[in-house]
Amino acid sequence: MQQELFTINNLWMMVATILVFIMHLGFAALEAGLTRSKNTINILFKNTIIPGLGILTYGLIGFNLMYPGEIFQGAFIGLSGFGINLPANWDNAAYNAGYTFYTDFVFQAMFAATAATIVSGAVAERIKLSSFMFFSLMYVGICYPIVGMWKWGGGFLDTLETPFYDFAGSTIVHSVGGWGALVGAILLGPRIGKYTPHGIRPIPGHNIPMAVIGVFLLWFGWFGFNGGSVLSANPGEVSKVFVTTAMAGAAGSIGALCAAYSFTRTFDITMVLNGILAGLVGITAGADVMGPLDAVIIGSIAGALAVGGVIFFDRLKIDDPVGAISVHLICGIWGTLAVGIFGSLAGWPQIVSQLTGIAVTGLFCSTFSFILFFGMKKARGIRVHAREEIEGLDVNEHSMQAYPDFASKE
Amino acid sequence: MQQELFTINNLWMMVATILVFIMHLGFAALEAGLTRSKNTINILFKNTIIPGLGILTYGLIGFNLMYPGEIFQGAFIGLSGFGINLPANWDNAAYNAGYTFYTDFVFQAMFAATAATIVSGAVAERIKLSSFMFFSLMYVGICYPIVGMWKWGGGFLDTLETPFYDFAGSTIVHSVGGWGALVGAILLGPRIGKYTPHGIRPIPGHNIPMAVIGVFLLWFGWFGFNGGSVLSANPGEVSKVFVTTAMAGAAGSIGALCAAYSFTRTFDITMVLNGILAGLVGITAGADVMGPLDAVIIGSIAGALAVGGVIFFDRLKIDDPVGAISVHLICGIWGTLAVGIFGSLAGWPQIVSQLTGIAVTGLFCSTFSFILFFGMKKARGIRVHAREEIEGLDVNEHSMQAYPDFASKE
Amino acid sequence: MQQELFTINNLWMMVATILVFIMHLGFAALEAGLTRSKNTINILFKNTIIPGLGILTYGLIGFNLMYPGEIFQGAFIGLSGFGINLPANWDNAAYNAGYTFYTDFVFQAMFAATAATIVSGAVAERIKLSSFMFFSLMYVGICYPIVGMWKWGGGFLDTLETPFYDFAGSTIVHSVGGWGALVGAILLGPRIGKYTPHGIRPIPGHNIPMAVIGVFLLWFGWFGFNGGSVLSANPGEVSKVFVTTAMAGAAGSIGALCAAYSFTRTFDITMVLNGILAGLVGITAGADVMGPLDAVIIGSIAGALAVGGVIFFDRLKIDDPVGAISVHLICGIWGTLAVGIFGSLAGWPQIVSQLTGIAVTGLFCSTFSFILFFGMKKARGIRVHAREEIEGLDVNEHSMQAYPDFASKE
């Protein structure tokens, strides 16, 4: 009997793993679609190399930092070795009721690379490839697993009197990415021509169908991201998470539609797309403790917040080509807070814990990102030359074009 | 023991749910690919907002209309409340041997939005966005669940002496969409320039690779659409449905290839793509009662019918930019009829029941659609201005372009 | 108890089936993306028709050749009939502990069409459509299942003293496709303008985002390709295969990146994409007998080999537009050999068996392909006219364009 449930649970976790995997294609398509065709190869290159870098780095060190104990376990950091060390009973229910050691590793590895992918969108069209790759390596290998350990690896956020709650990672994954995105975007500065004396110049994405493909694949994968975070195939729990994930994404699209229409009087598809993601980020922290109505409220507020965020950061002249900071940081914070406001954990003690987690994560990740980006900036520069930026990164960093057969507009 | 099978069944239903979900991306990509680049944002916008609208509307009212009983149950209409009302035992096998209440809801919600998506293709490139959105809301929220209730909610089609049979919805999903598509296309009239005094002018789709992505994703999702309609993970039943679904899609592609080649002497990829969908629509009503050979026959006839349908509707000057009426209505009817001709239910009584279901659904859906479209047409118009249509809906309704970096041909 | 595990195993095999199915979209997107826009319809047409042709042919004859016995069973060839013949107990564990007969068939059918798809890329942009379709029919219907039978159908490679080992088909699927690709590319000759007196002229792919979509979908599907080859949902085995598949793909991307950078000093995304596939092909033969570190080594060598292969075949003036020969043949051989070098089967006897399997498969497939291609070449030609090739196959064979709205560069 044990064996049957173990096999089912493990099966769901493996399916969830590949759903999270395909989110990397979602990010690649979204980010490429929302930027200019002269930088498409560059963006796709980053998003193509990140899963590879992420999986290898996470295998080498990240997994050991995130789930420590073998070597030492502290409240803020720990370690269980280097490389992938198969424990005893790794492949049966004596190891874990829900999945094998390998399933655990590969599921977590797919999650890990997400944090770097989020950053990629915000720093697009102007960052040096080598700087981004070094940052990603450090962020996936060290920053993300340390923060993850605080909650999921038994660290101090999990041992608060009222434990910080983050079901699938509104803070631990999305905000972590979002802080890196914010610091990167600030230190890089805006793209040439974005903020002019005459106002903000919109720089439209070059391939909206790609962006649509990206968002649908992200929503598709999110059922594995949230659903897999149940860590078993428990029918009631996973199906509840499916409902909240579906409802929040749906509500996010409508929330963003309404917010965008009331600001601009147009039906802006990029806002709807970001609204879906915002709803999904928003529900991620509490997907298992919310009812359908909570999910609709959280999602629609998240959708509106994403629209407001895009406008807000543009006012601050923080240039985020794809809206990643609004979606992942703002809505990641909102979703984390919402656990204290809606659903079965709501209450002041939970709100305090949520704020604690948000603040500590923000402090750590922004410092970590600042040190990396600022250090690289001083040492060798993190931004391509103006000429390269104007001509496009594809020709200059890759000697290739994404669409060599087609004539461009000018 | 109960618990293991319940968990497995529920797991398959959840996987099927996300497979049906990704069909919305399939429709988006197919419809965008087969229309012109000046209307791409508009089409993608509709297909992006439909899942959101559909899920929310279905949660609010549709699900309660489709599976009535709590408040009242008639032969033609019933209701079980408003919103999502968790019944007792919703998360265990005492509620249902195959899945939890939430799984049921989210699976059905993904199905529901499909009907509106089918309409979207046929009315593309000329309908007002607001008219389409209002129609979708009504169609998904009211028309679709009422028809669905007739069979799947214990209504009069299910209680005929020889019950009407529609396994996964050749009639109840695809024809429902198809009737809305037909009525919409007639009331809107053809696109400007399509039917000229000198004959029919082909208006080619602007991005065939997108259309290919769309069809493959639809086929991929159809394994969940049909396979999930088993409502359990029963190995024999689901694997049989997989085989008939694979065979009918395959035969549809070859049937359409042969039909198209014999008419035009060219290898027309759009016909092959529609042929795959035609085969899939055709097998949907009887996917569980057919053998592999039946599936091949039904699929290849469906593929040929789709090609014939496209030519037929063009002769009637009913302009359907993506061939949705041929694929979903004609082949939906064919597939439903085929249940009386092939497979384990074949026989005159079944044919009569199938014809009854087809006729009643056609009458209801075309009337419902006519009232909606005609009412809106009289009240405020359903078609964009000629100038907007010629310039493109993207610039006029959305102030955006799908591919701003690329030069267009003329 | 039996029934629960049977249902779980069968469920995983069905999910794996649709994962392998979506690989056909992966190949379509990759091959279309890496070739020129004037031949896009042609390539998509081939890749769209192949799954249909493949499934039907495999049902008619291929499956019966690959798993013989009912009629006769030899060491090199056998047969179990024609069409799909349901055996007794086909739908329960008495037939097979892992899956039903139908699941077996549909999973194998999805595999079968892969071999022809691999060829499609190497012969792209110059082969006659009819020649390719006839070749595919023969290759999927006869060549592939005969080779498959040698190992998976109990043939002579499986009864060697040290049995040849090929877990999921580095040789039996990928090399089979690769040999057809090699012979086809040689007999067709290079594309006009590829090899000039002044050196090799690069012919860049027209849509790199499509190629990225293709590779990610292939990796996604590969978890079903390799994971499904466990033939059950055994948690330890499938999760191990997931880890090796993830690691090898990751390592392939980094291996190719390093190799390509050291040759060209640019960050060539097409090399990284092929490197991912190379790593995946490389691990396929031994995905269940390798540890994570073995997978990293095998994958990174495969990634480098793919880059070297592309350069090598270009030197030989064998024109392979998408690099299929390097990825599927070279890395298929490498992966097969690696089973004798790394992992739990390593040793001289295994190396000898692996070399035997590689050699016999190469001899048979290249002869089979040569007879087909050479016979067609003599009888009616296999290559389009130079004028058609220069103008593009889309206009000439299909009277269509993939992107009719966009202006091309010249």
Image: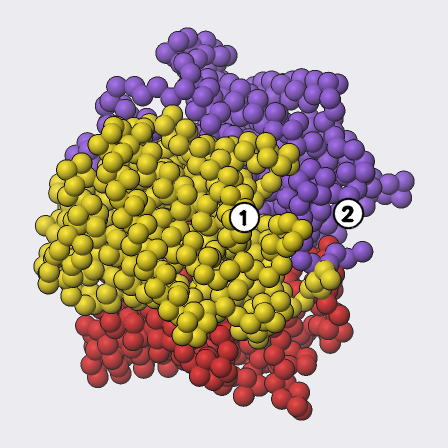
Chain colours: A purple, B red, C yellow
* Residue under label 1: C314
Report x, y in % for residue B130. 64, 65
Residue depicted at x 77% and y 47%:
A202
| Classed neighbour count for the residue bearing mark 1: other residues with Cα under 10 Å, few (<14), some (14–19), many (≥20) | some
Q: Height in image: B47 above or below C241?
A: below
Amino acid beneath label 2: Pro
Residue depicted at x 17% and y 50%:
C155
- The quarter of the picture where the C terminus of chain A appears is bottom right
| Classed neighbour count for the residue bearing mark 2: other residues with Cα under 10 Å, few (<14), some (14–19), many (≥20) | few
* Residue under label 2: A202
Do marks 1 and 2 share a chain?
no
Q: Quadrant of residue B108?
A: bottom left
Report x, y in % for residue C63. 23, 60
Instruction: For mark 2, name the chain.
Output: A
View extreme (front): residue = C197
In the picture, measured across the screen, residue A79 lies left or right of residue C363, that is: right
Asked whether residue A190 is in view, the answer is yes
Q: Height in image: C261 above or below A400?
A: above
Residue depicted at x 67% and y 91%:
B197
Instruction: For mark 1, name the chain.
Output: C
Q: Height in image: A43 above or below A269?
A: above
